[in-house]
Amino acid sequence: MDLEEIPGVGAKTARALAELDDPERALRTGDVATIARAPGISQGRAARIARGAIRLEHDDPGGFLATDRAREIYRDVLTLLQERTVTRDAAQRLETFYPSSRRSRIEQARAVARDALERDPNPDVLAALEGVEPLVEPGDVRVRERCLATTDAERYSEAREAVPELSTEIVDDAQGLAELARGYATVIALDESFAGVTIEGDVRVRPDALEEPAEIVPERALAFFARNRDRLAAAIDVHRAAGLESEVDCDLDALEAALERLEGDGTVAGDDELDRLRRAVDDVDAAVGTAENVANDQLREAIQEEDVTIEGSDLLSLVERGAGVDSLLSRELADEYAAAVEAAREELCDALTLDTGETEIARRVFGDEPTFPVERDEDAVARLREELTTAKERRASQLKRELAGELADQRETARGLVQDALELDVELAIARFAADFGCTMPEFVWAGESGAAAGTSEPDIGFAIEAGRSPLLDEPLEAIDPVDYEVSGVTLLSGVNSGGKTSTLDLVASVVVLAHMGLPVPAESVRLRRFDALHYHAKTQGTLDAGAFEATVRQFADLATGGAGSLVLVDELESITEPGASAKIIAGILEALTENGATAVFVSHLAGEIREMATVDVSVDGIEAVGLVDGELEVNRSPVKDHLARSTPELIVEKLAGEAAEDDAVANGGEPVGEQFYDRLLEKFE
């Protein structure tokens, strides 16, 4: 795929997309989250790019939504869908569903919608989805206690590119390697020539190191999984709650267990030995101090209880030799001192839970030569701390390598788990929308197309809606009267004020938009043709000035000459100018639309006048008011075919005539007086 061929993608954006691991897959599947990981591309921009890629795939020219009101309808129904997502990414993913005139795209989206209607949006799945987000890269990972070393400049460049997390150094010989070993905890030599060379420090000869990055820099894999640990855990919960069968081969239990061993900072948890070493390193000074106190307390008590007798000649001899209390301890309290030191050593080893090798080092912290007070050997303490720290780092590195080995090859698996969960959120939003608005999948009549489905014997069908309820009405579904309406060709829709003409147009527009998005529609049954475009002209507020009027007429001129295959919905176009002129203009527009084969519904209070002026047969449907009850209209919301609906004024005059007849009968013994006036008015409506 040539990225610059995608509508809206220039050279700069194409370069950013090319940095993704598999941009073509992301674009082909509408993976907004992955596209948004490209440098400088936001989520909203990613959704537009994904739409552009879909259009390119289906050779879709776009422009289905031909007017502002048509675009408003799309945004309104899309918002209703997005409100039913749990994750922000799924809401953005729904932006890739757009009304298209291309059958291949409609069918592609319908396949997704059919699967979605099989989904069960149960509360456990929705709750689990709350923690799912697209996976992110952890940023630059730097490891400072480890380095790579080589004598070859070409190998040096290769190592820097393959393992940027570690410093790479060039050395001339074994002496240079030894110098590095004094500055780094671990040095990994990439040259086979260093094999067998003995160098003090942790120096490993690994000519294959660049082929096994998880071995030499396990932090790479661990940082990714640590950064995304909670997101992956949530995705695992979603898969289990939904019984989701992923396309990726993944042992959820094994992955979950590995994640539980990983701390948020990328270190490994849940290992008793590492925990012991960490505590020991942290507690060395405190444990030595406590052990020192144990020895001194025990020795002090022994001295207090011991009755020591020194003859004069012995005391003189000790003084002449410069001996002090240490000599007295050695002579008189050797056993007590040895016991006190042993108690200190046992206390230190027990407090730090040291193993056999560490115990040997720890015992040197307190010497055998008697002193009072008993004092630690600082060099021995430092040696113990160094030994414990080295053991801790060695154990941590081993665990990192083991865990990284388990996780290194699961990065794409992890992405697949999260992607599947986010796709499920999209499907559940469609399912919830369908349930909330009583939706069904529409049936398309693919007239005039190769491979047309059954039913193409009806090429003149526009749309046929049974029990439709507009999702745009701010009413509970059960409070909305269902509407049946079928149109083929060009039709005028008449009806009383507030009878539901505009909401009927909104219903038709919503059904057509959703159907061309490939999604379920709010009705019990819908059959429709594939339209090339939707032209929805909303009601104009007030008479237009000359310039605006001219622009409006130009729009219809373009539509009349190039609108074949379009659906045209117009709400009270007569408001653009004087009623007499409006009727003539609308009649001329309807004539042109009839000739080019468009499907159109024009709402108008001048339906009768327009029909009389038109030179072609124009159907007139009516939303009929049953009557007035307590001042409120009772309306049959479903348009009646080939019926010019009575206006609200006619109904009011008819009501007044009936009331006047009753009043005159009471007042004048049955002789109608006021009734005659109303009857005369009613005759004007005939």
Image: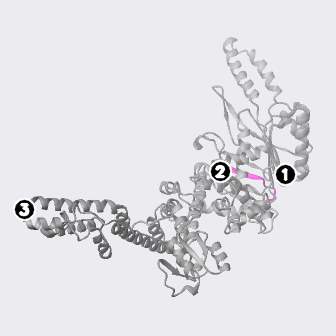
Q: What residue did someone put label 2 on?
A: 523
User: Which of the two marks, 3 or 2, is nearer to us in this view?
Assistant: 3
Q: Is residue 87 above or below residue 640?
A: below
Left or right, 390 with respect to 31, comes to: left
Left or right, 291 with respect to 408, comes to: left
Q: Residue 604 appears in which quarter of the rendering?
A: top right
Residue 243 x/y as whole percent: 50, 65
Residue 405 x/y as whole percent: 50, 75
Left or right, 200 with respect to 302, comes to: right
Q: Which residues are magenta?
A: 457-465
User: Which of the two marks, 1 or 3, is nearer to us in this view?
Assistant: 3
Q: Nearer the viewer, residue 308 or 48?
A: 308
| Helix, strand or loop status at disc 2 | loop
Q: What residue did someone put label 1 on?
A: 598
Please tell me which residue is depicted at 40% across the width and 72% down the height of the picture. Answer: 391
Tell me the amino acid under the disc marked 1.
Answer: Ala
